[in-house]
Image (tube, rainbow, N blue to C red):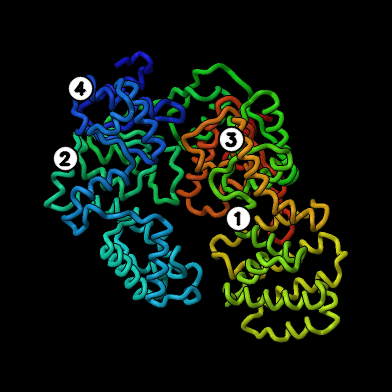
């Protein structure tokens, strides 16, 4: 195996034997190369049998890339390596293999199936129905408020290596402990009854089997060499499994400063405590960055310095373009400038798929999406839902369509079901009554109003169907005067959406939805009229699909819009990191020191995605849900970077 392309730090990490080791790989320092070279060295030079090596990472994509690289070094076809006895897989894939081999010991048949997220939610909904747990019975902050909230908290408890039955207050709040206990037990019982497991069970039962006196000894010594990728992203449950394996030659690779999955229970302290947990462990720092220019690394090193990190990223590339920083008056100005910058970059020869717009959350780039559509620049979105596909925007579009076309049955069906106690059957019945009334008066709502028939229809709506009355009143109100300015239509749509919002969305993300809708309403006001607005929103999806097919046919490439979380492990020639204002990052939702530190790590990850060019942007004024503007300055996380640019 050729080792000449490894630098001295990488070579030392690859060659080490005899004790656990931590490879502290800063961004762009070649961690995947080191991990695959280490595995190849064990097989080719140290003559370790294939079935005695375990290589674990977090995603199928990473598994495929490591398999590809290892096959090249071993000079064997990839399919042959996949069929070989060496195990390269994710944590969950490895767990599935263990459970199929040893699961009978705990009553799990080898032909068990794995529930996906939709299926687990369906099971939880059936349990809530069986226990007669109703949504309005508990507050929105209580996990028993909905099956989704219950599953989310249940998963967090398990991944923090705790027993849900011993943590009932977290699953039930101040009330409902008995109900929570019944829900947990029934959830377990139904999975056992049907020989199914969820994703959390895979890891939890792997741990159970490894602790079992009858199976633990064999499972714990299945592998002589355990290699773990992205170690900073492990949670307490995964770390507890690792400690139960043969750790004499344990090798883990990661970067503490890229630990950004706290919301998934990842615990960066696993990385920090490695040397204390494994006596005799050796640390190998990898600092040489092969990805980015010195200018970009300077910005990243400023972040590292503020964390107390002693290691620094070292550049091997020649000097490049200075990092740029732009502050704009408002969000639309920022979005338009970004779209124009992307247009210029593409015209100058930068491939579209080598340009990425990064943001802290998926809602921040929503205005950029509109601007890219306006300029005819194709894009793909990673992390979050495209603005036109978001549920709250679809609901607003339904109101707009109803105002434009009072016989739009799809708009009526969507709109009516946003109100309490109105299902599909009731919505169909109301629409048919409305349709008959309009047709009776030759399609004229004004004639129906003058005849008194409209008042009679409204009078027939009792208190339990007040949503029917509201929606009919909305249509009637605007068709009494069809020459109103577009602003009046949009303000009224926004007002009605604010009424239905608390009924249809979870409280914990309602504020975020309100902010997004407020910005969308501001964008809508740029339309020429109501027809232009509805066509713009209704055709955007069809146009997007048509454009995608054209791009596939002609081999065209797309700009990437991504959250930072979805961009981890990736890189682009040009990165525009938008929304770096102090009210946007750190997130206003962060409160603890640990959360603040994770925000700092997010900025570090964003910066180190760029190879050649990095632009930082933010708006000086943000539009609030009440229509007022909130002034902001640059993020304090980037204050040193900004100072150097002035």
Q: Nearer the viewer, mark 3 or mark 1?
A: 3
Q: Secondary structure at mark 2?
A: loop
Which residue matches tag 1?
Answer: 390
Which residue matches tag 2?
Answer: 221
- The image quadrant where one finds the C terminus is top right
Say if residue 633 shows up in the picture.
Answer: no
Q: Marks 1/4: CA distance?
A: 54 Å
Which residue matches tag 3?
Answer: 552
Q: Marks 4/3: CA distance?
A: 47 Å
Which residue matches tag 4?
Answer: 46
* Label drawn at residue 54: none
Report x, y in % for residue 267: 38, 47
Report x, y in % for residue 131: 37, 76
Residue in front for this viewpoint, 173 or 223: 223
Locate residue 316 relative to residue 378 in the image: left or right: left
Q: Secondary structure at mark 1?
A: loop
- The image quadrant where one finds the N terminus is top left
User: Disc 3 or 1, which lies upstream in sequence?
Assistant: 1
User: Disc 1 or 2, which lies upstream in sequence?
Assistant: 2
1 and 2 marks in contact (CB < 8 Å): no
User: Disc 2 or 4, which lies upstream in sequence?
Assistant: 4
Q: Nearer the viewer, mark 4 or mark 3?
A: 3
Q: Marks 3/1: CA distance?
A: 25 Å
Q: Secondary structure at mark 3?
A: helix
């Amino acid at each position: 195996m050729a080792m000449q392309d490894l630098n001295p730090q990488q070579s030392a990490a690859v060659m080490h034997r005899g004790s656990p080791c931590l490879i502290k790989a800063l961004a762009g320092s070649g961690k995947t190369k080191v991990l695959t070279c280490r595995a190849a060295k064990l097989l080719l030079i140290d003559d370790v049998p294939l079935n005695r090596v375990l290589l674990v990472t977090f995603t199928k994509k990473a598994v495929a890339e490591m398999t590809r690289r290892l096959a090249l070094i071993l000079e064997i076809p990839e399919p042959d390596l996949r069929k070989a006895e060496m195990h390269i897989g994710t944590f969950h894939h490895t767990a599935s293999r263990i459970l199929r081999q040893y699961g009978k010991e705990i009553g799990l048949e080898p032909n068990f199936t794995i529930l996906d997220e939709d299926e687990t939610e369906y099971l939880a909904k059936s349990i809530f129905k069986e226990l007669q747990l109703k949504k309005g019975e508990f507050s929105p902050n209580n996990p028993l408020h909905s099956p989704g909230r219950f599953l989310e908290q249940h998963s967090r408890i398990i991944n923090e290596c705790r027993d849900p039955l011993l943590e009932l207050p977290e699953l039930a709040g101040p009330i409902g402990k008995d109900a929570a206990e019944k829900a947990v037990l029934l959830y377990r019982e139904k999975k056992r009854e049907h020989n199914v497991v969820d994703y959390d069970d895979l890891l939890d039962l792997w741990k159970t089997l490894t602790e079992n006196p009858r199976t633990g000894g064999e499972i714990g010594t299945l592998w002589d060499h355990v290699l773990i990728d992205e170690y900073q992203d492990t949670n307490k449950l995964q770390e507890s499994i690792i400690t139960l394996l043969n750790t004499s030659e344990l090798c883990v690779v990661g970067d503490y400063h890229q630990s950004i999955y706290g919301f998934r229970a990842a615990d960066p302290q696993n990385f920090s405590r490695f040397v204390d947990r494994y006596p005799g462990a050796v640390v190998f720092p990898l600092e040489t960055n092969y990805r980015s220019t010195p200018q970009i690394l300077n910005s990243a090193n400023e972040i590292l310095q503020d964390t107390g990190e002693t290691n620094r990223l070292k550049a091997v590339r020649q000097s490049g373009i200075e990092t740029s920083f732009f502050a704009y008056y408002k969000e639309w100005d920022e979005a338009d400038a970004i779209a124009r910058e992307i247009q210029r970059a593409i015209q100058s020869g930068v491939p579209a798929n080598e340009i990425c717009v990064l943001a802290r959350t998926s809602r921040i780039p929503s205005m950029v999406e509109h601007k890219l559509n306006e300029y005819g620049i194709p894009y793909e979105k990673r992390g979050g839902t495209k603005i036109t596909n978001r549920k709250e925007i679809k609901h607003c579009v339904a109101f707009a369509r109803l105002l434009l076309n009072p016989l739009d049955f799809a708009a009526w069906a969507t709109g009516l079901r946003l109100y309490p106690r109105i299902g599909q059957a009731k919505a169909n019945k109301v629409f048919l009554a409305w349709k008959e009334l309009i047709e009776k008066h030759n399609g004229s709502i004004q004639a129906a109003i003058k005849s008194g028939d409209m008042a009679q229809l409204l009078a027939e709506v009792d208190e339990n169907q007040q949503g029917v009355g509201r929606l009919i009143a909305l249509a009637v109100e605007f068709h009494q005067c069809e020459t109103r300015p577009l602003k009046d239509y949009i303000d009224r749509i926004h007002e009605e959406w604010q009424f239905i919002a608390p009924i249809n969305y979870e409280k914990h993300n309602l504020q975020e939805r309100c902010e997004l809708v407020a910005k969308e309403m501001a964008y809508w006001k740029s339309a020429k009229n109501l027809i232009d607005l509805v066509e713009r929103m209704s055709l955007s999806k069809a146009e997007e699909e048509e454009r995608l097919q054209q791009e596939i046919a002609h081999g065209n490439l797309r700009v990437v819009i991504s959250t930072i979380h979805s961009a981890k492990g990736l890189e682009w020639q040009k990165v525009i990191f938008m929304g770096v204002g102090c009210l946007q990052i750190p997130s206003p939702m962060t409160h603890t020191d640990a959360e603040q530190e994770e925000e700092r790590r997010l900025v570090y990850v964003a910066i180190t995605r760029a190879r050649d060019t990095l632009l930082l942007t933010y708006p000086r004024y943000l539009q609030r849900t009440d229509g007022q503007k909130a002034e902001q300055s640059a993020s304090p996380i980037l204050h040193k970077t900004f100072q150097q640019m002035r």
